[in-house]
Image (spheres, rainbow, N blue to C red):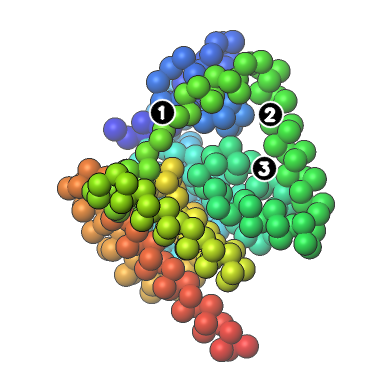
Amino acid sequence: MPFFDFTNLTQAARVILAGGDPYAYPDVYYPLPLYFIFIPFAGLPAPVAQILWTIIELVILVALLRQRAIGVILFMPVVLTLLMGQIVMPMLGLFALLRKNKASGFALGVLALKPQLVLFIAPWQMWQWWRKDRRQIFWFAITLGALALAAFAVQPDWLTRWLAVSGSRARAHLSPSVWGLFAFLPPLIWIALASALTLGIVAWAWRKNNFDIIAIANFLVNPISISYDLTMLTLTVKQLRAWFILVPLSWLCFAINAWRLNEGAFVFTTLAILIFALREQRAARGAS
């Protein structure tokens, strides 16, 4: 259903404005401060709000990717983001700030409202800040604390209400990661294999000590992500020609996912992005 997520996000914002509990409604499972973003859209007619939100998404995409946006626009996670009206595109802008280490404490604080985007990035980033720029830890804490306090002012029990419903989004067996890919195995083997791969891939990525590699690894092993979250990875491969391979691959993986009724096949898209990113970094080192 087009704009399904956007409808839920704006509905939650309307409930907040009315003084109600958004967690009493289905498909409301993000931390409460995230829904504040959609308050400006809550009073608009649905078609107007949807068009305005789509324009904002496209402006962000083009501003960040420039010429690459021509190829990336048909990348299946991007298509799904636009189709569903998700919040991923504004998060992509914050992801770009975090990647470039600009206002990174603030960026990670807001990104934490959609935790799956930074599940394995945040601990590494905290360690980098501790070693090189501890002020960003302060700004991260201030940002997240201010958002949480604003939410408590609006709904004092929001944290317990959120925790009560957040478990409904447990979807490791469906995720576009190694957890979804191997979900067909018997449970004990599945959990053991996916856990081992998660630990091994995260450890390898952290040793690389490179934001892009860690970001890609984050989605390769992320048990709570969704396919449109892979939009974040459009920042990691710069060559436009690479997207002429990645786009059809993403559509093929989507077709396999539709047949299997889970998103595990997207692992092959993420692996391809990893290969292209490593090649670009190797070429950059050789040129220097």
- CA–CA distance between discs 1 and 3? 24 Å
Q: Name the residue beneath numbered marker 2.
A: 148
Q: Judge the density around disc 3: few (<14), some (14-19), many (≥20) Cα neighbours within 10 Å.
A: many
Q: Judge the density around disc 2: few (<14), some (14-19), many (≥20) Cα neighbours within 10 Å.
A: some
**133 shown above or below 244:** above
Point 32% across, 46% down: residue = 188
Q: Name the residue beneath numbered marker 1.
A: 168
Percent of width and height locating residue 281: 53, 78
Q: Seen in the image, is 259 located left or right of residue 125?
A: left
Query: Which residue extends farthest front?
Result: 188
Looking at the rendered structure, the kind of residue marked 1 is Ser
The residue nearer to you, when weighing 197 against 261, is 197
Q: Earlier in the sequence, mark 2 or mark 3?
A: 3
Point 41% across, 73% down: residue = 275
Quadrant into which the C terminus falls: bottom right
The residue nearer to you, when weighing 234 against 266, is 266
Point 48% across, 29% down: residue = 166
The residue nearer to you, when weighing 71 against 98, is 98
Q: Nearer the viewer, mark 1 or mark 3?
A: 1
Q: Seen in the image, is 253 located left or right of residue 167?
A: left
- CA–CA distance between discs 2 and 3? 10 Å
Q: Earlier in the sequence, mark 1 or mark 3?
A: 3
Looking at the rendered structure, the kind of residue marked 3 is Gly
Q: Name the residue beneath numbered marker 3.
A: 109
Looking at the rendered structure, the kind of residue marked 2 is Ala
Q: Earlier in the sequence, mark 2 or mark 1?
A: 2
Q: Give the SS element for disc 2.
A: helix
Q: Give the SS element for disc 1.
A: helix
The residue nearer to you, when weighing 243 against 188, is 188
